[in-house]
Amino acid sequence: MEKKNLQSSSVTVADVARHAHVSKSTAARVLGGYGVTSEKVRERVQASAKALKYRANELARSMTTGKSKTIGVVVGDIENSFFGIAVRSITDVLNAHGFNVILANSDENFDVEREAVNVLVGKQVDGLIVAPANRYEIAHLENLKSLKCAMVLFDREIPSLNVDTVVSDDAEAAANATAQFIDAGHKRLAFVTATQKERRSDDGEWLIPTSSVGRRIEGFLSACSRAGLKKEDSIVVLNSDPDKGLAPDISNLLDQPERPTAILASDSHVALEIFKQAQERNIELPGELSLIAFHNADWTEVTRPTITVIDQPVSEMGRWSAEQLIKRIEGSTEPALSQVIKMKIINRQSVVPPQSVVPPK
Amino acid sequence: MEKKNLQSSSVTVADVARHAHVSKSTAARVLGGYGVTSEKVRERVQASAKALKYRANELARSMTTGKSKTIGVVVGDIENSFFGIAVRSITDVLNAHGFNVILANSDENFDVEREAVNVLVGKQVDGLIVAPANRYEIAHLENLKSLKCAMVLFDREIPSLNVDTVVSDDAEAAANATAQFIDAGHKRLAFVTATQKERRSDDGEWLIPTSSVGRRIEGFLSACSRAGLKKEDSIVVLNSDPDKGLAPDISNLLDQPERPTAILASDSHVALEIFKQAQERNIELPGELSLIAFHNADWTEVTRPTITVIDQPVSEMGRWSAEQLIKRIEGSTEPALSQVIKMKIINRQSVVPPQSVVPPK
DNA sequence: TCTTTCATTGAGACCGGTCTCACTAACGAG
DNA sequence: CTCGTTAGTGAGACCGGTCTCAATGAAAGA
């Protein structure tokens, strides 16, 4: 009553101990829930804690235990519903196991990602779930292996890292969707993504930094060549100028004299932009343009036509990554797992044979 | 070379100091970037730090400084694009100022929210941005006022808390949208939200826990009564069974013999469900049913008809909340601000006079 | 040459918990 | 009655940083 005129600054174990007339050690045992204490003392300490409105300082706790009960999650862009759903399922699983999530957006920029990873490691996260923006820039992730920080890659693989990874079967799904176009009679196809290509590799080729997109392109191209399509009839549209966004590239694609009759969109944002621009140009869907989109976005069921999509089991991927991370944190030492979750095509109305081969009724 | 056979456990200032042949204090000064050090020593310490791959332990740093450089953000559901955008803009601002974000989903459940807030405070966050799920349950937030933890309310106000708050002008915008329906000749209107009503208050009335939704309903009802609409012609549809979701409630609404001719949807999810169910029932939009939705979701531009929306400046709200929080953390003591950000209606094609008053051409 | 000043450094307390270890008292066994 | 065992407690080191304060030594002024 005469002491403690400090305004509000936090109440510590020592304060509670003093109030309950026990040693700091004993109060800590009660409040920390470890060791042994007598019934009598326990009640007394708890009463004091309540009276003083004691709150444990988790930072101090983490300092000594070495466990922060915090996980870093690094995604491309939380605004994107793909990552929104992923983060949701990840946090649900982690929270259920007593972990909290520090969220970081890489903006699909490698430098931002590296910085984010460093900060998170500095904050002593127990683990990381990362959707790496660039499969060719992996030094910052490689460094983690020497630390006690668990890691799971989400949606994008980096085989050389040899670390737990969950992806969907991007190449196969893209190939299947492409085959569906080809089976319907399409001869000029495009794959459209908002990803940019990057620095030439040693052998002079352009590289796709985002592994999932890269694999989709592989699938698309292999299905095209398997069907004997000419190279110039299997168009891959990338983002040519990040400042302007993808819209100009889609304009170019739709305005070219021999525009494709079928497009595979790498995500729902891309599909929406294609849909919008087709409407503006009075390009009739699906008659003049067939469309398949990755990601079963909610709105793809209400457009006319409804849109055939490749449904990514995002929640399942999120859940797997979180559960696997927890296993690692709990000490699992099994060899790195690579989980591939199958996608399935949901057939709706946006794929039909190209107009030219269908005689008008 | 003879010591330090510890496998990988972290390198500390003391280790660096030893390696550089200086005291712990001096090494700490260099690595922490405070105090004064000579050029020579600085270089030597930095070289040692690099050689040993030193990484600062931010937890330890936070312990002594009392600043964790971490902010807790509690939203209803990150899967919802409204919150997705909000979190994005919040993290952008905070990251730019050196803060990290711990994300928590309340699922619009008060108990979850309270628990989340407690955990975050335990983790010594420097501040909190909260979208409180229940404006009548505020004890957990009131407690924070005695702590050194800054707070800003996002999208939902609790006047009695007297804390910085950013909201949009929900009542006014709802009233304007409703007036637009009425001006077009509609006489039977509905407001639809996924929120549930809750425990009767003392005077026997049902309460809407989500402040923003509550204010929208107020605006809707006051515009209705101002226009002289009968009470039974101003329908408010709430979620009657959280387990089943809102779909059955929308079914009921659309299947009733005298269904409304215009609906105001409280968010884009609700609007999508209404749109979908109207399509299933061959209810023609906008002829048989006019629709206005809160939130300018990307897909509202590609449906047929395109949907008139109330555009919420979500990013601006997010930015404001983050900037205001930073001001508080930096010590601002100005009286609590209440920022109201105006929404504006984006007129598209989904509002027309009701079919019965328009003679078919 | 002696004192003063200032820049630089080192020693050690501290943050708020956890945890090891020693100590006490009570109990049952021999 | 003495000894070993054990439940319960307290003292104090420790985690990895920050920060205060005193000590050192060289340069500058007298």
Image (cartoon, coloured by chain):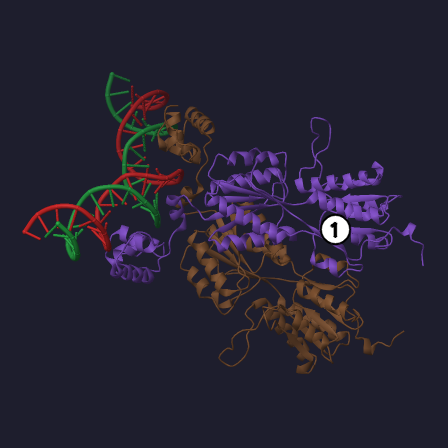
Chain colours: A purple, B brown, C green, D red
| Vertical arrangement, residue B36 with respect to residue B282, above or below | above
Please name the residue that numbered disc 1 is placed on.
Answer: A293
Whether residue A272 is visible: yes
Classify mark 1: helix, strand or loop. Answer: strand
**Which chain is indicated by disc 1?**
A
Left or right, B100 with reference to B84: left
The correct choice, above or below, for A190 with respect to B43 in the image is below
Seen in the image, is A96 located left or right of residue B257? left
For residue A359, side relative to residue A58 (left or right): right
Q: Is residue B131 above or below residue A164?
A: below
Q: Quadrant of the C terminus of chain B?
A: bottom right
Q: Is residue A126 visible?
A: no
Please give the name of the residue rendered at 48% of the width and 79% of the height, measured from the top-left corner.
B202
Asked which quadrant contains residue B256, the reply is bottom right
Residue depicted at 60% across the width and 33% down the height? A160
At a point 65% along the width and 60% down the height, the residue shown is B312
Q: Does residue B174 appear to the left or right of A261 in the view shown?
A: left
Q: Percent x, y for residue B25?
A: 36, 33
Residues A59 and B91: in front is A59
Residue B87 locus on image (x, y percent)? 58, 53
Q: Position of residue A29 (x, y in %)?
A: 30, 53
Q: Nearer the viewer, residue B199 or A96?
A: A96
Tell me the quarter of the picture where residue D27 sits: top left
The kind of residue on which mark 1 rests is Ala
Badge 1: how crowded within 10 Å, few (<14), some, or many (20+)? many
Indicate the position of residue C16 as horizontal and vertical percent values. 35, 50
Q: Nearer the viewer, residue B139 or A70?
A: A70
